[in-house]
Every structure is written in C-alpha cells, then in structure tokens.
C-alpha cells in the first residue's frame, strides 16, 4: 500500500481530521492549552541559546548515539539509514514547533508525527522504533544548546483575489513592512519575492498581483498567472497560500472561473500543497435565520464554500485543504506576548507557519520514503466525475419529431393518422355546404328564449361548428397528400409553391404583430405590457425573447433570447439550427441544437443532431443519430444512438422505440434503452398510451397513461402518471392528473376551467377560510 503524506484540518481550520487511527492517536495525547489571554493561555517562548561549546559537542555526540542505538536485528543498511534520516526529520519538525511556541502535543504536531510513523510502517519498517518522548527531549536539548543549526528553509507563494490582504499578511508574518499597502489602490503590480527570518527560520515569500473574479477578466488573470509561472520556474514554492476574505459571503461558487484558471495554468497539483487562508478573521458573524451565527459556524460555512469551489476546480472531491485564519488589523486583540489573537482564542501566526512548515516536512518525508504515487513531472491525478446517466438516458428516450422540408410541414406531420382517416372520408364531405341557412342570435334574443329553445339553439350551433371544423381538417388532409405525391414525383411547379405558401401561412412580406404573450396578473394600472410585443418579419432568422413568467412588476421580464433558422440543402435535405441563451444575476444557461434529416426510401429516414446544453457548471456535448422506418401501415419503429461528453466523462447510449396506432382513437408508444459511462450502466424504458375522442381535436376528450422505469446502481425507480381531460357542458373543461412512484409518493390534482360559470372562482376562498378557522381554534386552545 502506497500513499502520499498530507496534513489536513477540518473545515473550520481549528483542529485536524483523519481516519479513525489518526483520531485515536491524537486523543491519547494530552489536550493542548487554548491560545488566548490569561494564565491558562501560556505560550512557549523560543528557548535561549547558550554558547557552551563543550556542552554542545557532547549533546551532538549523544544525539547520534540515541538515533543509532535502536537498530533492529536483521535490518539492512539501507533501511537503517532511511530510518535514521526519518528520525532526524521528526526532530527537525519538533524543533520548528518549539521555535514557533507550540508544544509537541499540539494537534497539528501530533498528526504530522502520527502520519510519519504510519508511513514508516506502511513502507515495511518495524513498529515502535520511534519514541515520541525521546525525540521531544532531543529537540529541546538541541534548541537549548543553540549550536547545531537548523537546516530548514521554506518558500511560500501567496495567491488570491485583489484586495484580500496578501501583502498585509506577508508584512504580518515578518513583523515589518516588506510591502506597501493601500486600502484604495492595488498594492502589488508585479511578481516579487522577499526573504526574511522568522524565529530563526529562513522564509522566502513570493507575492503576486491580485486576481479578478469576473468571467470577462480571466484573460487578465491568465497573463498574471503566466508571469507567476515564469517567475517560479527555477525555484518552485514549497507551499501555496490561497487567500480569501472571511467576511465575503458567497454561496454560488462565483470564484469558480478564477479557480479553474489557476488550475489550467499550474495544473491540479497546485491544490495538493495549498492552504486556504481567510483574512479579516476578526469580523463579526452575520445574522442567520435563528439570530446571530456563532463564530465557529460562521467560519465553518465560509470554509466549506471555498473548499468546495477548489474541489470543483481541481476535479477531485477528495481534496481537503487545511484552513487558517488571519487578522492583519492593528486593532486586533493581542495576548501578553504581543501576538494577535482571533475571537476563538487562537494565535493565528504560529498556526499558519506551523501548517506551512508541516507541509514542507511531509514533502521531505515523501521524497525519502518514495511514497509519491504519481510519476515525477506529471500533474496530480484528477478524479473523474461520474456522468449523470439517468438524466442522459431520459434525454435519449425522449421522442423527437422528424425534421422535414417546409413543403412537408403543412398540418400534422404524422402520416399514420392520414392513413387511418381514409375510412372517414365518405361521400358526405359537403355535408356542411348542404345545411340550410342559419342566423346567429344576439344575447338579447337568446335571453328571450325558453330553456328548451335555448338548448336546441346551442345544440344546433355546436353541430354546425363541428361540421365546419371537419370540413377544414379534410381539406387540409387532402392538400397534404397532394403535396406528398407531387414531391415524390418531382413535378411540383412554381405555381403550386406559391399557392402552398399563400394557403400554408408562409412568412409575411410585411412585418406583422405576433400574438401577445400570456402575462401574469398585475394589480398595477401602469403595467408595461408594450415591452412584450414584437413583430414577425420575412427574415428567415426567427428571433424571439424568452419570457420570465415569475418576474417582478416594472421589471424587464426577458431573461434570454431564442434564435431559430431552417435551411434546405439541395432542395431535399432540411437543416435546422436553434439556440437559446438565458441569464440571470447568478447563472447563465446555454442550449444549442443542430438537426438534419435524410430520406433513403419510402417511409424511411435518418435524423442526425448535435446538442450543447449547460448541465450545472459544465457544458454537455451530445452527438445523436436515429433511424425511423415503417414496417406496417399502423406501426413505426426507430433505433438511435447518442454519445455525450460532459467534462472529461464520455457516455454512450442506445435506444429503441416503437409506435403502434391500434385504432384511430388509440395510440401506444414504447421505448427502451441503456446509457453507459465510466464502467457504469443505467437502464430505462417508458410506455405511453393515448386515448382520444372520435372527432379529436374537435372533440376535447383526451386521456393519457404513462409508465417509466429506471434502473441505476441497482436502485429501481418506477413512476406512473395518468391525465384525462374532458368537457363538462358547453364551455367548461375539467382536467384531472395523478402520479405515483414506487417509493409511495404521489400527487393528485383536479383543474376546472370555465368561461361561463365564473362562480367557481369562489372555490379559491376555501384554503383562506380554512386557515382562518384553524388560527381561531388554535388561539382558543392556547387561551
């Protein structure tokens, strides 16, 4: 088993986390003293260094004896040298912790020592060869002697947005003004490095210009990061500090474009040795739903947002970057040693430096024990994202109409209905023309009729309207058949084209106003409805706005733009391009579809398409193909393939579809398929049965039953829904819907729509009356 050593903290940045073994090792140690004010918060000071040469020499000799006296029998010389070097790394780290004023029982120190011991055991060395007490005493002796120098230096690179306090944090680390800072101007304009000493430890810090968060500013960020990359090419940093502000509330991953730019320039490996630093850590917590948040909750929420954004940018949800808090303001509370203390009692500067030095120590141990799993020079391996197979499969199983040339788009495009309606084309087509004359009555005249006369009048009116609509549908069907025959024979003349364009409602040569949009009800007399009116011109590009139905009054209700265009290649191959772009204050969505259809025989056609759509923060690219053929007069079958690329995940799917027209009134559509990706497969299928009125769409009765099944990871999801609409009287429609799934949840809804019986609107008062009665009863019970 091979692993890479890391040091992690929880999302609040206050204590380490790890597996159960790590927790057990840490709990067995004495709890560390809390940092802060008062006698209970005593902080170890750097030990004074004596100048006694003889004592120093004796200590050094004793050190070598103590490190080599525990050679295990049967151990090779190479293993012995490696173990001795690892012991020196432990002692070095304990000396670093001692100089920073941290005890050996500090949680970060204990975790690093535990991981070093665990790595040594995983490599095959004997357990128990390391003594914590002896190493701690040895480190104190070396620090007290002061003669044996500490061979350690650390290079830290600081990255972050502009104005978060990068230069101010560097000045606080060195306790002197290395860089000038200004609250109203950009402080750092170029990459520069500064070298100093902190508690006798040489520290080199690389300051970088501030980065911008807007998506349009990523080109500027790329230039800045490329200059940083050139600067660190010869001397790469040991640790990276990514700075952000604690008091900047954000839950929508607005910094994700910036983090992805950093990942693209430096590679995902930059986040492996990165520490998240939250500045302005003395800020007061904001108000929450239940009052003011506690400081720990405030820090945990902000840390989680930044860490999650880094995971998204790196493509590895296992990353757990440690978090450190920083406060650079001169009014920050200090302890008796003059060190700045955070509201949670933590002294931030030693903690930040200890995390940085711990990462350098663990990197040295990685190089010594050869625990690096990735080949040198290659970036950190990114965990592949699991594609949303159920979503992709549902999109694949969705039935799409065949794309046709304009001459074939007249009326209903389902030829099976025409074939089945041939029996209804009897000799009484002109029945409407043979009806006797009929005079419509006014409302005043209708009011004078008796109840029986009024019923007979409306029955006669409905009968005449029904015959008139039947006549129109038959003429439409005849013209569609004629167009198909002419197109098949290739003898369609220009005169017929002109007639079809005139009768089929082609594009108008003069711009005409489009029908008004369905706007929500408004109680404002100054409702700007004129904003939502537009014209339809003869331009082949159809551009329409996307309306937001749930907008505010006096606000622009357009949230996007829709563009469509239909091309005809060689007078027989249709090509459609459509796209929609919508954007609000937080996110934007893009949908693009290119489709075409090619006929290769009677009742046989192949459709090809390319789709782009936004899925979360990624864009999914889908290439699909589908072939339709009619094997019987009342049966159509289809088979299709699709390939989807989402991020770095590639998915492929297959589907089959069969459409049966058992009767003019009854139709069944069955489909099934599978979607595979990343060694994972999702299966699904659907069935939809439709029963409609004998004279549909003249008759308004329509019932639909749907059943869907999805199997993914052994989790079977079954859902069924039923919808039925039917007329109740002459001007009233009722719609009933019901759905149920295998998890026991469902919904039932009934909708009544009427243009005559306006009193049914009073039903909406029932929930209001119910709430009033319940509140009344509750108040009486309380009293």
Image: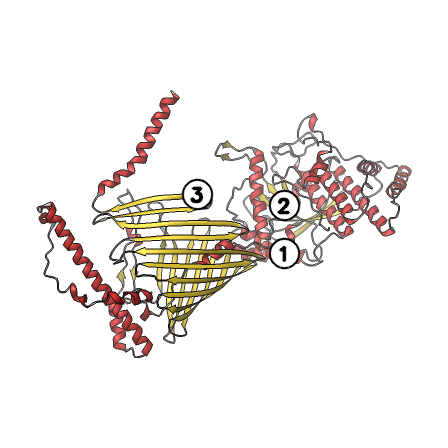
Is residue 504 at all visible to an observer of this figure? no
For residue 164, what is the image quadrant? Answer: top right
Does label 2 or label 3 sit earlier along the sequence? Answer: 2
Q: Residue furthest top?
A: 783
Verify CB contact (< 8 Å) between mark 2 and mark 3.
Answer: no
Q: Please provide percent x and percent y for residue 567.
A: 38, 70
Q: Nearer the viewer, residue 736 or 670?
A: 670
Residue 281 as seen in the image, left or right of residue 705: right
Name the residue beneath numbered marker 1: 267
Colour pattern of the rendering: secondary structure
SS type, badge 3:
loop
Distance between the alpha carbons at the discs numbered 3 and 1: 46 Å
Residue at label 3?
Answer: 745
Residue 660 image point, x, y percent: 37, 62
Dot 1 or dot 2: first in sequence order is 1
363, above or below 413, in the image: above
Mark 2 or 3: the one toward you: 3
Residue at 45% in and 43% down: 744
Q: Secondary structure at mark 2?
A: loop
The first of marks 3 and 1 along the sequence is 1
* Mark identifier at residue 320: 2
């Amino acid at each position: 088993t091979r692993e890479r050593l890391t040091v992690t903290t929880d999302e609040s940045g206050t204590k380490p986390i790890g597996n159960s073994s790590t927790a057990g090792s840490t709990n067995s140690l004495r709890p560390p003293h809390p940092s802060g004010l008062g006698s209970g918060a005593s902080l170890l000071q750097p030990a004074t260094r004596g100048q006694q040469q003889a004592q120093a020499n004796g200590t050094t000799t004793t050190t070598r004896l103590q490190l080599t006296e525990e050679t295990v029998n049967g151990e090779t010389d190479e293993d012995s040298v490696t173990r001795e070097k690892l012991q020196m790394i432990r002692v070095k780290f304990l000396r670093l912790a001692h100089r920073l004023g941290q005890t050996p029982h500090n949680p970060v120190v204990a975790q690093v020592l535990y991981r070093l011991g665990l790595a040594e055991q995983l490599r095959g060395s004997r357990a128990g060869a390391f003594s914590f007490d002896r190493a701690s005493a040895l480190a104190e002796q070396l620090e007290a002697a002061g003669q044996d120098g500490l061979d350690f230096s650390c290079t830290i690179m600081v990255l972050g947005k502009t104005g978060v306090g990068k230069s101010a944090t560097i000045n606080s680390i060195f306790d002197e003004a290395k860089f000038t800072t200004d609250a109203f101007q950009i402080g750092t304009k170029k990459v520069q490095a500064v070298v100093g000493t902190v508690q006798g430890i040489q520290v080199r810090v690389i300051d970088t210009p501030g980065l911008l968060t807007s998506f349009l500013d990523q080109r500027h960020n790329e230039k800045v990061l490329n200059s940083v990359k050139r600067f660190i090419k010869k001397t790469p940093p040991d640790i990276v500090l990514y700075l952000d502000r604690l008091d900047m509330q954000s839950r929508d991953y607005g910094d994700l474009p910036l983090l992805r730019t950093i990942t693209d320039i430096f590679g995902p490996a930059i986040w492996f040795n990165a520490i998240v630093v939250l500045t302005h850590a003395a800020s007061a917590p904001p108000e929450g739903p239940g009052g003011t948040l506690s400081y720990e909750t405030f820090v945990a929420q902000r840390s989680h947002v930044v860490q999650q954004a880094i995971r998204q940018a790196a493509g590895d949800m296992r990353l757990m970057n440690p978090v450190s808090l920083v406060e650079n303001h001169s009014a920050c509370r200090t302890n008796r040693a003059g060190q700045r203390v955070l509201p949670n009692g933590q002294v931030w500067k030693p903690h930040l430096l200890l995390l940085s030095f711990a990462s350098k120590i663990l990197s040295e141990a990685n190089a010594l024990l050869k625990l690096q799993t990735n080949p040198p020079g290659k970036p950190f391996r990114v965990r592949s994202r699991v594609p949303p197979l159920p979503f992709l499969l549902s999109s694949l199983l969705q039935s799409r109409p065949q794309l046709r040339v304009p001459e074939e788009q007249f009326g209903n495009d389902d030829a099976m209905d025409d074939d089945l309606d041939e029996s209804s084309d009897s000799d009484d087509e002109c029945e409407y023309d043979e009806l006797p004359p009929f005079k419509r009555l006014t409302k005043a005249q209708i009011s004078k009729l008796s109840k029986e006369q009024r019923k007979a009048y409306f029955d006669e009116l409905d009968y005449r309207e029904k015959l008139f609509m039947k006549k129109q549908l038959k003429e439409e069907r005849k013209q569609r058949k004629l167009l198909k025959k002419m197109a098949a024979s290739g003898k369609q003349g220009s005169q017929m084209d002109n007639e079809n364009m005139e009768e089929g409602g082609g594009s108008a040569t003069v711009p005409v106003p489009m029908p008004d949009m369905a706007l929500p009800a408004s109680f404002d007399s100054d409702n700007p409805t004129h904003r939502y009116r537009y014209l339809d011109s003869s331009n082949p590009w159809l551009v329409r706005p996307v309306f937001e139905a749930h907008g505010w009054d006096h606000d622009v209700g357009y949230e996007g733009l829709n563009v469509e265009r239909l091309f005809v290649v060689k007078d027989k191959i249709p090509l459609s391009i459509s796209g929609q772009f919508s954007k609000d204050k937080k996110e934007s969505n893009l949908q693009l579809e290119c489709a075409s259809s090619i006929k290769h025989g009677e009742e046989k056609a192949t459709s090809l398409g390319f789709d782009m759509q936004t899925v979360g923060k990624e864009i999914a690219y889908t290439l699909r193909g589908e072939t339709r053929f009619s094997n019987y007069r009342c049966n159509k079958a289809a088979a299709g393939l699709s390939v989807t690329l989402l991020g770095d995940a590639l998915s492929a799917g297959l589907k089959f579809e069969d459409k049966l027209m058992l009767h003019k009134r009854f139709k069944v559509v069955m489909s099934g398929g599978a979607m595979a990706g990343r060694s994972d497969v999702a299966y699904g299928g659907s069935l939809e049965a439709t029963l409609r009125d004998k004279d549909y769409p003249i008759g308004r009765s329509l019932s639909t039953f749907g059943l869907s099944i999805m199997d993914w990871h052994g989790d079977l999801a079954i859902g069924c829904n039923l919808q039925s609409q039917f007329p109740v009287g002459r001007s009233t429609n009722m719609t009933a819907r019901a759905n149920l799934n295998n998890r026991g949840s469902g919904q039932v809804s009934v909708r009544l729509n009427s243009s005559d019986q306006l009193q049914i609107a009073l039903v909406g008062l029932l929930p209001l009356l119910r709430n009033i009665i319940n509140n009344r009863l509750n108040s009486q019970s309380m009293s």
